[in-house]
């Protein structure tokens, strides 16, 4: 299966839930299934299978997770299939679930079992006919590019005040700010939080400059471990993070100094830890999803290295994924942001020009995280990539991220 997690933000840009998007077959390899794709998973719901295999914590942490169901799977034994607490799962349906008695009775039973319900893809003309369905919904997704969302917001606030509104398909920060100013929306969904910076107007804070200097130091071919340890010692957050990492590796060893802790990790592991920990600190004043995107891209790209026959470049691919949002972190265009750190020519080509030998991996990673399954499927066919290996590469990245912040 292919699986991606899409964040849902509140007005403070804090992630409050994730939507789980799953594809269990490559329909480009099975054209006959294209017309019946909605029946895929009629007995088993792919999203619930993923929760069972990977765990809800790896997918969404302590947040709610929205799982797609359709007009057929809604009648399956969802209660038995769900391996997570029902109150953490929101069953997300669309307009194929009709406002008929059999659907309404089934939705009532699911609500009684503790599930929350959400619906999307309802046209304005369907609001009144779907009255009995909407009375059961906890959330409704409103595509602000397809309908007059301001009027819809007023309508729902008067007729269905208990439904939480989710503003969807938000492309830019400007759209997000406008919708936030209107008020009345519980969640915001879209790619607005990943909008690239095009104008270099912001100064980089002194603290971030120090972090960047540390990144440059450890990304030299043969950096001085003791000097790196001394720089780490100037920042309490990094010291705490380093000690936690070392304690995980050797709980019986007494750490006598920062240099001792760095030596226990060794040059290779210290370099990787610094790249990860420093990026996390650089993101401290950004939405927490930027940190997650950066780290998941890094680990996913690294895991994809052997699949793309680039195992020898796995460390570089990790850095490429890590720095793929550096423009957002530093509030500068990507070329200016990369001027501040030391990266290889291949990484720079991929991130700035969209070219070079690493670009296929970067494009695959970004298409995958957006759940653009048709393009992901096309690339897997062209490169002769096995779906199972991609699934394992991504889910291992999710588990790695969960474990990274477990303590």
Image (cartoon, rainbow, N blue to C red):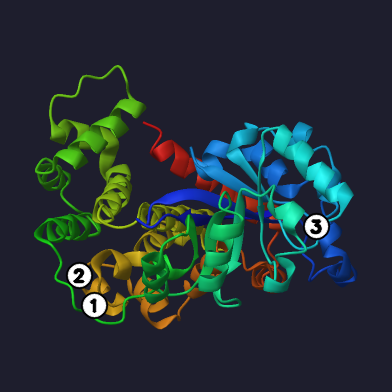
**Mark 1 crowd level (few <14, some 14–19, many ≥20, 10 Å Cα):** some
Q: Which residue is mark 2?
A: 340
| Crowd band around label 2 with a 10 angstrom C-alpha radius: few (<14), some (14–19), many (20+) | some
Q: Determine whether, in the image, residue 6 is placed left or right of residue 258.
A: right
**Mark 3, secondary structure of its residue:** loop
Q: Report if the CB atoms under discs 2 and 1 are less than 8 Å apart.
A: yes
Q: Residue furthest top?
A: 252
Examine the rendering and report whether any part of residue 181 can be seen. yes
- The residue that mark 1 highlights is 336
Mark 2 / mark 3, whichever is N-terminal: 3
The reply to whether the C-beta atoms of the residues labelled 2 and 3 are less than 8 Å apart is no
| Residue at figure coordinates x 17%, y 31% from the top left | 260
| Residue 113: % across, % down | 72, 32
Please name the residue that numbered disc 3 is placed on: 97
Q: CA distance from mark 2 to mark 3?
A: 52 Å
Label 3 environment density (alpha carbons within 10 Å; few <14, some 14–19, many ≥20): some
Q: Is residue 163 above or below residue 400?
A: below
Q: Residue at x 20, y 70 (%)?
A: 340
Q: Residue 57 location in percent, x, y? A: 53, 37
Q: Toward which corner of the image does residue 309 lie, by quadrant? A: bottom right
């Amino acid at each position: 299966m292919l699986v991606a997690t899409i964040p849902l933000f509140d007005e403070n840009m804090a992630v409050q839930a994730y939507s789980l998007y799953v594809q269990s077959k490559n329909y480009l390899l099975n054209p006959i299934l294209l017309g019946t794709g909605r029946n895929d998973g009629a007995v088993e719901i792919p999203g619930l299978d993923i929760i069972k295999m990977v765990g809800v914590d790896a997918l969404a942490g302590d947040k709610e997770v929205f799982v797609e169901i359709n007009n057929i799977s809604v009648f399956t034994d969802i209660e038995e299939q769900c391996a997570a607490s029902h109150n953490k799962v929101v069953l997300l349906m669309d307009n194929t679930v009709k406002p008929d008695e059999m659907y309404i009775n089934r939705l009532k039973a699911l609500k009684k079992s503790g599930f929350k319900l959400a619906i999307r893809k309802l046209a304005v003309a369907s609001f009144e006919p779907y009255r009995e369905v909407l009375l059961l919904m906890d959330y409704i997704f409103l595509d602000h590019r397809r309908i007059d969302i301001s009027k819809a917001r007023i309508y729902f606030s008067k007729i269905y005040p208990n439904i939480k509104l989710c503003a969807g398909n938000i492309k830019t920060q400007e759209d997000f700010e406008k919708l936030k100013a209107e008020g009345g929306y519980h969640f915001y969904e879209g790619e607005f939080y990943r909008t690239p910076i095009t104008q270099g107007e912001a100064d980089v804070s002194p603290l971030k400059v120090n972090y960047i200097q540390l990144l440059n130091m450890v990304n030299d071919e043969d950096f001085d471990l003791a000097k790196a340890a001394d720089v780490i010692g100037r920042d309490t957050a990094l010291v705490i993070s380093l000690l936690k990492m070392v304690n995980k590796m050797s709980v019986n060893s007494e750490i006598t100094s920062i240099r001792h802790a760095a030596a226990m990790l060794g040059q290779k592991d210290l370099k990787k830890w610094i790249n990860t920990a420093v990026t996390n600190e650089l993101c401290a004043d950004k939405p927490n999803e930027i940190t997650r995107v950066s780290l998941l891209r890094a680990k996913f790209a690294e895991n994809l290295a052997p699949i793309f026959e680039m195992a020898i470049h796995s460390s570089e691919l990790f850095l490429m994924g890590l720095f793929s949002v550096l423009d957002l972190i530093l509030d500068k265009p990507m070329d200016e942001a990369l001027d501040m750190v030391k990266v290889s020519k291949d990484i720079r080509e991929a991130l700035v020009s969209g070219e070079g030998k690493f670009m296929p991996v970067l494009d695959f990673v970004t298409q995958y995280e957006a759940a653009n399954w048709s393009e992901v499927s096309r690339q897997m066919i062209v490169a002769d990539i096995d779906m199972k290996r991609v699934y394992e590469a991504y889910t291992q990245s999710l588990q790695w991220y969960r474990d990274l912040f477990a303590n």
